[in-house]
Image (cartoon, rainbow, N blue to C red):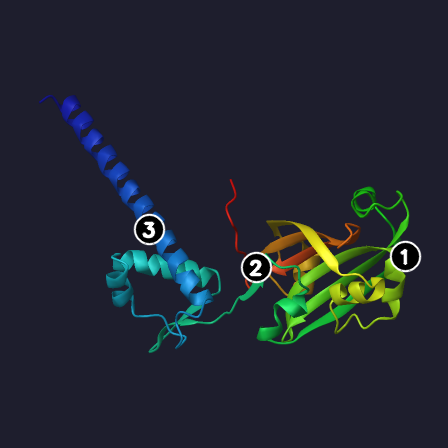
Amino acid sequence: MPPTDRIRDHAGQGATTVAAHRARRRLRADQARQLADLLRHQILTGGFTAGTLPHETILATDYRASRNTVRQALDLLRAEGLVERQPGVGTVVVAQKYPHGLDRLMGLAETLREHGNVTNEVRTMGPVPAPAPVADRLRVPAGADVLYIERLRRLNGLPLSLDLTYIPLDIGTALLDCDLENTDVFRLLESITGRPLGHAEITLEAVNADANSAAVLEAPRGAAVLMLERLTHLADGRPVDLEFIRFRGDRITMSGLLHRSC
């Protein structure tokens, strides 16, 4: 075989080897992500009651994965702050996420009452001219004053969410004299209006925390937070509460029960 042909043949074999190596890496990364999803569910639902994950060898056997895949999956969970490796102990659960349901209209204290005490730090409160999108959604005249409330909400002393709330002023004025530090706004709205809340429209998305939000929530700048936008109506259909809630993504999970209708 001429030298040039041998060079081309060698180069072709090398390209094939590199491509195969990359394919194996992609496959292992895919498998590690799949395994991390399964382990995350068990962590968040209390599946590891002792607080320690099984040994890597056991995980590899149980999930029919290689040790490298298991290690890579655990690395993903460590990066999320859910587990840590402790010498002589193994991989232990170090963080807890709290469940927030999306199939019932409840305030945060009502939602998390089984997990501890929710307190509110009222950072800002007072009338402001309604920005056009707020006025439109609350069905008030453009530029009309609405009550604006900004609260840092803590669960058992740990920052959980930063809530920005807009309420029509004819209802919101009565809130100025209420105990917002220890009471959900939902309960107060029902008490003030004498009518029950009916339904809410929600949008949930992941956003990066801006510098100010990160500082308030004591989270790393640029960390992912869950943004819940919620417009709540009274039972008669009147919109009374527009909220933009930034949850620390490492401390909350969102869940709901969906029914298929055809």
Of residues 223 and 5, the one drawn nearer to the viewer in this rendering = 223
Front-most of residues 222 and 169: 169
Q: Which residue is mark 3?
A: 31
The residue to which callout 1 is attached is 170
> Cα distance, mark 1 to mark 2?
34 Å
Percent coordinates x, y for residue 124 in the rendering: 82, 63
- Which quadrant would residue 109 be assigned to in this image? bottom right
Residue receiving disc 2 = 249
- Residue at position x 72%, y 55% from top? 198
Crowd class of label 3 (few under 14; some 14 to 19; many from 20; radius 10 Å): some
Give coordinates of residue 165: x percent, y percent: 77, 57
* Label 1 element class: helix
The answer to which of marks 1 and 3 sits earlier in the sequence is 3
* Amino acid at circle 2: Gly
Q: Is residue 85 left or right of residue 172?
A: left
Q: Label 2 crowding class (10 Å Cα cut-off): few <14, some 14-19, many 20+?
A: many
Residue 71 is at least partly visible in this image: yes
- Give the label, 1 or 3, closer to the camera: 1
Amino acid of disc 1 = Asp
> Is tag 3's residue or tag 2's residue first in the polypeptide sequence?
3
Residue 161 lies, in percent from the top left, at 66, 63
The x and y percentages for residue 137 are 78, 45
Q: Secondary structure at mark 3?
A: helix
The CA distance from mark 3 to mark 2 is: 24 Å
